């Protein structure tokens, strides 16, 4: 493997990490601030992708679709919060897991009823078409650079919101000790609703951005959800900074693992066995890394919750 | 005493249960079809194609098969073998279906084959064609109107040979069907496989693999990425500017995924025994009426199911509507006395079709929709590699 290929793979890893971060950011806030396990976060990502695709098709413009899909995803998040999740905050984690899993099944079938089972197509906006040649014969799509930029900008915005504003202060306080925040006269339920809706919108935003790269289909959120949970557990539940670092870490480990593991195993195994074992090893690598990190830092890299 | 009483009760209730079944037995002149098509989960689009193809066949036959009024019992296998077995058993025992037709995925077929054939009922697969039932495992009550999976992959191997590609990059998902695809491809490809990449079935982003392909600079790539995997791969392949490397695939670009792949798949290759543009009257009628009815372009799943309706029609007509004489019925099905939408069609000794295979190319139709079109005939009257091992009769 050449240095150039390694650099390209690192870039690919960062790109996957940024997308994971957008999904994980909302999840870590909801989990951290409300102590609420929301398995339905993945379907909110899917819902964002579908809303973006449908609105882009209806208006004929990706950008208009993006702008309209954000409030629509926010509204969908609010609706779910009011109808389902609000009644679960006081329950234990098992009840939350069961109920939000039910929401996954319901919405996965729901989008199929509305949009059909076949994957939808979202075209790349003409402004971001084309690619930059990063190695001979390989184009890096401009759209992916834009996603990278959008993810970094969102990360910066979130950092500013959480670290530098009054609402952010309350969110941080809620993450470390919610009953105390409530006792100090803050309407914690309104804060919860706000955080939840914002998290849903972030997931929806990630979904819209993913539309032109991945296939928009029922169940698309399920794979992302598992990785997003890995990210927030590694990063420390409730920590935006942790989610950011962990997302990049997971993206890099996953991508570099896939490209390097088979080649490394070839040193000790015969080529055909190395390819299959390498592929299996690469898909485990993220979870191995999670276990290793948790063994040394059981609360994740950047723990939030105060003792 | 209690034991005796319970047994007596059981016998009595069995008799009671059997009574309505007798009362509701098929009136003379009817035939019941259990149609197994996945309608749940991400692969439901394929099940919908399969179902609609069979229903279109019935529509062309005025709802009759060989003169008998046809009733369809819809079975959603949910892509879960244990669910499929339960539902198919219910269809056999409660609904008393005369034939079981359909099945998209091989693992579902493997699960229901014994329950159906042991009930002396004919099972006609309209898509799944695993090698397990083509060789030693062939079965007198099992037919397929599709193909043996290995044949389709080997078509691409042969096509690479014919086109003079010497260095081919291979990428498949890391599970049994993926490894079978590689074996099928290699059975006819004699050049160098530059690299074999196995990806997880849950793969989202192919950028790492695409970089590897670009670095390897192969003459062509061979891939097998069914469903959403293929949608992701095809679009990312095009976006990465790799489309100048020929893209040859199986079950990756077809009419079920093309609506989502669109322009990104233009000029990419696939392999099958049928394509929507095939130039024969029965196919033109099928495609035209199917699109008018269901408003999308049919894929092989639909075409093979349509053929199965025509096959059953011809067989039932041959035996004069007598569904009880199983041996005569088997001979009638084996005769395959119908006009297939793919042109020439006959069954081999193992009840798998002996047919031509084509290299297909994705094209845009004048109406803006995308479909695969025949590029070149690669294999003629091809017998699957397992047929010789079948000791039926």
Image (cartoon, coloured by chain):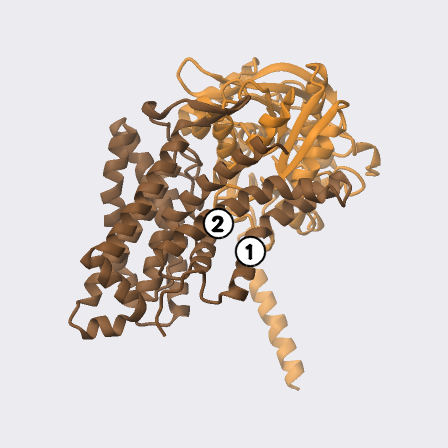
Chain colours: A brown, B orange
Pick out the residue farthest to the front: A3
Q: Are marks 2 and 1 in contact (CB under 8 Å)?
A: yes
Residue at screen point 52% across, 60% down: A293
Q: Closer to the camera, B298 or B264?
A: B264
Q: Which residue is mark 1?
A: A289
Q: Secondary structure at mark 1?
A: helix
- Side of B137 where B279 appears, left or right: left
Q: Which residue is mark 2?
A: A249
Residue A307, horizontal then vertical, whole percent: 36, 75
Answer yes or no: are tags 2 and 1 on the same subunit.
Answer: yes
Count of numbered marks:
2
Q: Closer to the camera, B242 or B261?
A: B242
Q: Is residue B67 visible?
A: no
> If you read the primary sequence from the N terminus, does the residue marked by circle 2 or circle 1 appear first?
2
Residue B105, horizontal then vertical, whole percent: 60, 41
Residue B154, horizontal then vertical, whole percent: 71, 27
């Amino acid at each position: 493997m050449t240095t150039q290929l390694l650099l390209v793979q690192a870039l690919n890893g960062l790109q996957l990490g940024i997308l994971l971060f957008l999904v994980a950011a909302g999840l870590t806030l909801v989990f951290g601030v409300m102590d609420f396990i929301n398995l339905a976060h993945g379907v909110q990502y899917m819902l964002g992708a579908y809303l973006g695709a449908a609105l882009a098709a209806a208006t004929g413009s990706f950008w208009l679709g993006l702008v309209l899909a954000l409030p629509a995803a926010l509204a969908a998040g609010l609706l779910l919060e009011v109808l389902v999740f609000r009644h679960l905050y006081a329950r234990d984690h098992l009840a939350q897991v069961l109920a939000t899993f039910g929401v996954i099944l319901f919405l996965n079938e729901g989008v199929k009823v509305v949009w059909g089972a076949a994957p939808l197509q979202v075209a790349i906006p003409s402004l971001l078409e084309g690619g930059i040649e990063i190695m001979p014969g390989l184009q890096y799509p401009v759209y992916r650079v834009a996603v990278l930029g959008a993810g970094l900008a969102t990360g910066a915005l979130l950092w500013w919101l959480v670290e530098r504003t009054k609402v952010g202060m309350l969110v941080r306080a809620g993450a470390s000790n919610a009953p105390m925040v409530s006792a100090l006269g803050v309407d914690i339920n309104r804060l919860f609703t706000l955080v939840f809706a914002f998290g849903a919108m972030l997931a929806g935003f990630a979904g819209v951005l993913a539309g032109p790269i991945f296939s928009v289909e029922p169940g698309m959120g399920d794979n992302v959800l598992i990785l997003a949970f890995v990210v927030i557990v590694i990063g420390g539940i409730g920590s935006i900074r942790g989610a950011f670092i962990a997302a990049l870490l997971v993206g890099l480990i996953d991508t570099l693992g896939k490209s390097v593991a088979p080649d490394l195993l070839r040193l000790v195994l015969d080529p055909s066995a190395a390819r299959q074992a390498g592929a299996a090893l690469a898909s485990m690598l993220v979870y191995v890394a999670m276990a290793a990190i948790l063994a040394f830092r059981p609360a994740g890299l950047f723990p939030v919750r105060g003792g | 005493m209690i034991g005796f009483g319970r047994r007596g009760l059981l016998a009595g209730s069995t008799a009671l249960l059997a009574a309505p079944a007798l009362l509701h037995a098929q009136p003379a002149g009817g035939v019941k079809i259990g149609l197994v098509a996945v309608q749940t989960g991400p692969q439901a689009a394929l099940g919908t194609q399969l179902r609609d193809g069979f229903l279109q066949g019935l529509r062309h036959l005025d709802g009759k098969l060989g003169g008998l009024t046809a009733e369809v019992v819809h079975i959603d296998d949910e892509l879960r073998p244990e669910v499929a077995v339960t539902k198919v058993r219910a269809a056999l025992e409660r609904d008393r279906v005369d034939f079981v037709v359909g099945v998209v995925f091989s693992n579902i077929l493997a699960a229901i084959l014994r329950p159906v054939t042991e009930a002396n009922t004919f099972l006609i697969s309209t898509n799944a064609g695993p090698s397990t039932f083509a060789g030693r495992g062939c079965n007198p009550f099992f037919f397929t109107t599709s193909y043996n999976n290995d044949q389709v992959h080997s078509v691409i191997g042969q096509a690479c040979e014919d086109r003079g590609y010497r260095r081919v990059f291979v990428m498949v998902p890391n599970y049994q069907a993926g490894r079978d695809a590689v074996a099928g491809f290699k059975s006819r490809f004699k050049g160098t496989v530059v690299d074999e990449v196995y990806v997880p079935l849950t793969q989202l982003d192919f950028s790492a693999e695409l970089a590897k392909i670009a670095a390897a600079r192969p003459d062509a790539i061979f891939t097998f990425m069914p469903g959403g995997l293929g949608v992701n791969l095809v679009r990312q392949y095009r976006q990465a500017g790799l489309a100048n490397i020929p893209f040859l695939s199986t079950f990756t670009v077809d009419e079920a995924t093309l609506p989502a792949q669109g322009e990104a798949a233009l000029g990419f290759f696939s392999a099958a025994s049928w394509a929507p543009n095939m130039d024969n009257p029965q196919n033109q009628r099928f495609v035209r009426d199917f699109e008018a009815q269901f408003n999308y372009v049919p894929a092989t799943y639909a075409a093979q199911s349509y053929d199965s309706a025509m096959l059953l029609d011809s067989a039932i007509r041959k035996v004069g509507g007598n569904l009880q004489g199983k041996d005569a019925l088997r001979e009638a099905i084996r005769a395959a006395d119908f006009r297939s939408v793919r042109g020439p069609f006959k069954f081999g000794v193992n009840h798998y079709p002996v047919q031509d295979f084509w290299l297909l190319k994705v094209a845009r139709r004048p109406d803006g929709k995308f479909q695969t079109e025949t590029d070149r005939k690669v294999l003629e009257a091809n017998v699957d590699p397992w047929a010789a091992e079948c000791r039926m009769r």
